[in-house]
Image (tube, helix red, strand yellow):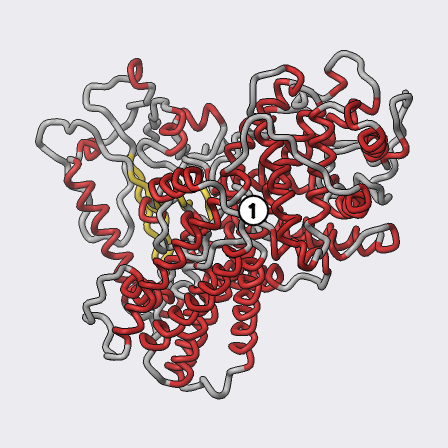
Amino acid sequence: MDREPRRRRRLALSCLECQRRKVKCDRNNPCGRCTSFKSQCTYKANGDLRQPRSMSSPLSPSTNAPPPSVQVAQFETNRPAAEGARHSFEFRARTIAPDSSPSTTGRSMTGLPSRAQATEQDIRELIQRVQRLEESSVSSPVNGVHRPSETNRDIPARQSGLEESHIIFKKTRVSEWGNWLGMAPEFAKIITCFQEATEGNYSGTWFQDPETGPLVTQACSLIQKCGALIRSIKAGRPSRSLYPGFSPAPPSREVADMMVPLYFRSFESTYRILHVPSFWAEYQRYWDNPDSVTTGQRLKILLVIGIGSSLHGHGDRDAEFRNMAHQWVCAAQTWLSGPLEKDRLDITGLQVHCLTILARYIFSIGDDLVWMSMGSLIHRAMHLGLHRDPKHLPAMPVLQAELRRRLWATILEMVVQASLDSEMPPRLSLDEFDTEAPSNNNDHEMDESTIVLEPNPKGTYTTASMQLILLDSLPTRLRIVQLLNGLHSELSYVDVLKLSSDIVDACRACSTFIKENEGSGVTAFHRNLLDFIVRRLLIPLHGPFASKARANPLFYYSYKISLDTAIALISPEPDEGFSHLMALGGGLLREGIKDSATTISLELIAQAEAQSLDGTLDRNSQYRETLKQAVRDRISLSVVRIRHGETNIKIHAYLSMIVAHVEAIESGSSCELKIVQSVRDSLVFCHGLLEEQASAVSLPSSNDMDIATSLDSEQEGFAFDFDLGFFGPDVGFQY
């Protein structure tokens, strides 16, 4: 029998620790994995050191004393060359201590050639020569065409976390990936112009037009006036005047009966918090005998009424209803964070907590701080055992088990949204719970007496279907926020494309399911909300690569999908309820719209500048007009939001500057003058809106107002706090 030829074993390139853990190694010294785990990073020497091909001089052996260590370096690049030929360069080295032995280092020293004793200086020079060669192949045109700086082999390279220049400390918070788009060079002129116009130290050195001086002075004065109005508006907010023992008053029964069904037809289908028949029983008992319900049940009812009111137009009573809802939310938050009583550690307490967070998102009540509140909610839920599936716990009624599964799925959804909005880690991973998905059943199919529950097929529409659809994509979305916000995250373009494909598939699955069940109660509100929740992740996921697309066409897909997503989010399906939500909502709605507006604005300026250089401004205006109209629609939405109580006027000012900048390019006039005129006009308009808002606010006592004002001035400030993620909410101009 012929002996099978000996198979040649492939050279191991990963460090020993990554080989043991069976994880991907980045082959640095030390590698990223070992650095994050604080473990020793060692490599096994296999064979001799290989010098790069096509290099004129090899590594010369050193006659000096053995170096402290031989530096680890690895290169595998393919660079295009003339006539389609490719030069391959390979260089591998391993870190070898001079006095180490196999017994102390775990590395094989067998067969190591003498030139492995090369000095560190020789290896550094070799690395520099390879880098210079690569740079020269990029900078010099091949066959008359400039090649992109990254090849197909380079694309999968890691974006090793976030570069320090992209991590910005804005007052008391850290902003990371949200600044990628805001740092685009297309915004440079607006950034410089705005800083000169609002810092109050106009010197005339940057502006060339003499007419800009008076406009800058007016803009600075208007900023101070707007800041004073915002202080007075915030001093009258319910959160500034609530006191212990505050008892929130309910609306009339007639009003409540209109608002509660709105909640169940909209938000409860996505965020499953309540069991509908049980809630209606508590609701009826509350109106029959208010003293018979607990504080938690009363707050639960008031929060449901308040959330439902966000989808109902009240006309002249809008401000009154908003103020009432704010009082209920603040009362619930006070109850949750009050004395540490065990009566709040139950399912009702968790329901009140979830409803409070949802209401804070909808009414923009400290919604940018929800991530901190999510930590408390997670701890409460885990303390009650919701992270363990009921089958692992002592026997309990079917209804209670299903409520626990629904609440845990809702908490997971809120964790992902809060992490994405705050650009902070989710603080929860998939291996920290084993709770199964809720059953696909309608609420009326189970009650306190139910013993056995038969789930409906997954394709059957029930009141749990929306939550189950979101739960299918939750692992992917959780992975995305972990990569975006993790301290030692490793984001490669291959990962981005895979995760992006999963998100697109999830959006298509949602759309297909909804089309198949259009006659089962699915509304345009459900379609818009589901699509917004899932699709919005595509912009921050592709942001780091989309910003490079104009310099490197290999990233064009990221640029294209970011723009398509932005247009889809900013132009939802017409629906009155969702329009009300966009006019009021904070959190995921405001952040999603912000990212969309930034992406569209960037494309608008880039198109105008490129067509101006090409001389095609008059021939290719239709696409540019479409983008311009999208920005104008966002300006109109900002006006509606200010009239609904928002104090952030920065978005209106910035978007007005974007439109003015593009119109100046189109007309060939002075961009600086147009931009300064637009910011002055925007501040004049917004000042009038703030005056209307301030006149409708009932101010507290003078002592309370002085305290609130001093706190605001110390903690927030009321100038335009310019940052590179400039479409984001300004701390000083937002409640």
Residue at horizontal 59 percent and vertical 44 percent from the top? 361
Residue 437 percent location from the top left of the image: 74, 31
- Dot 1 lies on which element? loop
Say if residue 439 shows up in the picture: no
Residue at horizontal 46 percent and vertical 23 percent from the top? 20
Does 512 appear above or below 185?
A: above
Residue at horizontal 28 percent and vertical 23 percent from the top? 109
**Residue type, label 1:** Ser
Query: As rendered, which of 568 and 383 lies closer to the eye?
Result: 383
Q: Quadrant of the N terminus?
A: top right
Horizontal arrangement in the rendering, residue 718 relative to residue 8 (left or right): left
Residue 706 percent location from the top left of the image: 39, 41
Query: As rendered, which of 454 and 70 lies closer to the eye?
Result: 454
Residue at horizontal 36 percent and vertical 60 percent from the top? 223
Does 697 appear above or below 104?
A: below
Does 403 appear above or below 420?
A: above
Query: As rendered, which of 538 and 223 lies closer to the eye?
Result: 223
Does 656 appear above or below 558?
A: below
- Residues packed near mark 1 inside 10 Å, few (<14), some (14 to 19) or many (20 plus): many
Horizontal arrangement in the rendering, residue 200 relative to residue 12 (left or right): left
Occupied quadrant, residue 569: bottom right
Say if residue 590 shows up in the picture: yes
Q: Residue beneath label 1, please?
A: 364
Residue 514 percent location from the top left of the image: 79, 53
Q: Residue furthest top?
A: 394
Residue 586 percent location from the top left of the image: 56, 49
